[in-house]
Amino acid sequence: MERPKCFVTSVFKHPCIVIFLLAGQILPFMVILASSETFVVFESKRSWNYDIYLLDPTTGEEKRLTDHPAYDGQPSWSPDGQRIAFVSERDGDKEIYVMDRDGSNQQRLTNSPGVDFRTGIDRDPSWSPDGSKIAFVSSRDRQSEIYTVNVDGTNLKNLTNSPTWDNEPDWSPDGSMIAFISHFNGISGIYAMKADGTGVHLLSKEPDGTERYPAWSPDGQKVVFVSYRCCGGWPSLFIQEIETGRVKHIPVPFNLPQYPTWTSDGNGIIFNNNQPDSQLYFIDLITGETRQVVDDPMPGYNGHPDWFNGNFHAVAAKDKLPSTWAGIKSQMKR
């Protein structure tokens, strides 16, 4: 069968719809063409100021994307690698912004003016897999809750709308679910809910309520997180299988790992250690080897990394990924 042709004017610019003719049926596939480049975007506190940087881990080359005296941090890649959502205090309180991947066209997305230190804070952005929405945390109602908003700033929705705190959302790869941490119904842990806020389900909990930073694997079958459930009271990395509920400890050679994020092939995790001289690290899940992302230490605190690898993707529009929610429901039946 001859490969279908898909014409784009530039890398990343537009996905295109390819039509396959098979046995008289039209099968639409969403195809995203991208380069094989790998980039890590992260926040860094250099010269006593937080800004966002872009790192090419293969060369160690860095590029500063924001340059503002206020806090800029918590970057999150769009699915096509063309835009970055981030948090900034440049307008007086923490709000969600978006910018192009080269740091240009920085625009404010949310507007939640606070009346005291507990309100008006928007943070922890996470893109939906189709690139149309961003999930984030807001305290605009005097309570930390999970919201979604369209990338043009419209259609703001409170998904959790509960009296408990909800934080650190991460969208599943098939777009069906959002993982987050919560004290839902008096139980602290990692939860998952459908993308519309329904079907809240406890994924993982530790008695002292110290599960943090959940992140879905690229295939939607696992979640990596940080927990204090072992290791002499120090935090460490753990991976939980969605289907079975099994939890595996991922040992790292130092304390205080933070903000884990998967590599695109699912075989590695990038994270930082929560120290004043924090660096970015990569752990190979096949070999167990942990190494620093760049040879020369980056000055100051470096954290909240997000990985992007621009590979060729051909995803069926009808059934983009195995249903993550199906795995959750099977776990609920046990």
Image: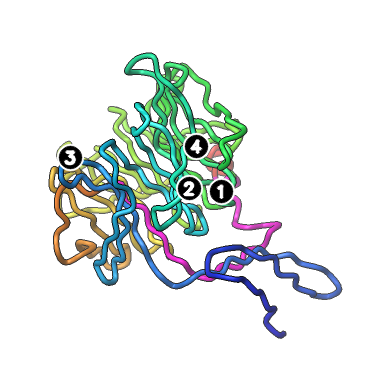
Callout 4 amino acid: Leu
Circle 3 Cα neighbour tier, 10 Å, few/some/many (<14 / 14–19 / ≥20): few
17 left or right, relative to 108: right
C-alpha separation, residue under disc 2 versus residue under disc 3: 24 Å
Q: What secondary structure is found at the residue carrying circle 1?
A: helix
Rendering coords of residue 163 (x, y %): 46, 16
Q: Helix or strand or loop: what does disc 3 sit on?
A: loop
Amino acid type for the residue under numbered disc 3: Trp
| x and y percentages locating residue 285 in the rendered image | 32, 62
Residue 59: x and y in percent read 26, 71
For the magenta stretch, what is the residue range? Answer: 304-327
Instruction: Work out whether mark 4 precedes mark 2 in sequence or the reverse, and give the earlier one.
Output: 4
Foreground mark, 4 or 1, reads: 4
**Residue on which disc 3 sits:** 234
Badge count: 4
Q: Which residue is mark 1?
A: 324
Q: Could you tell me which residue is drawn at 29 percent across and 64 percent down?
A: 284
The three-letter code of the residue at mark 1 reads: Thr
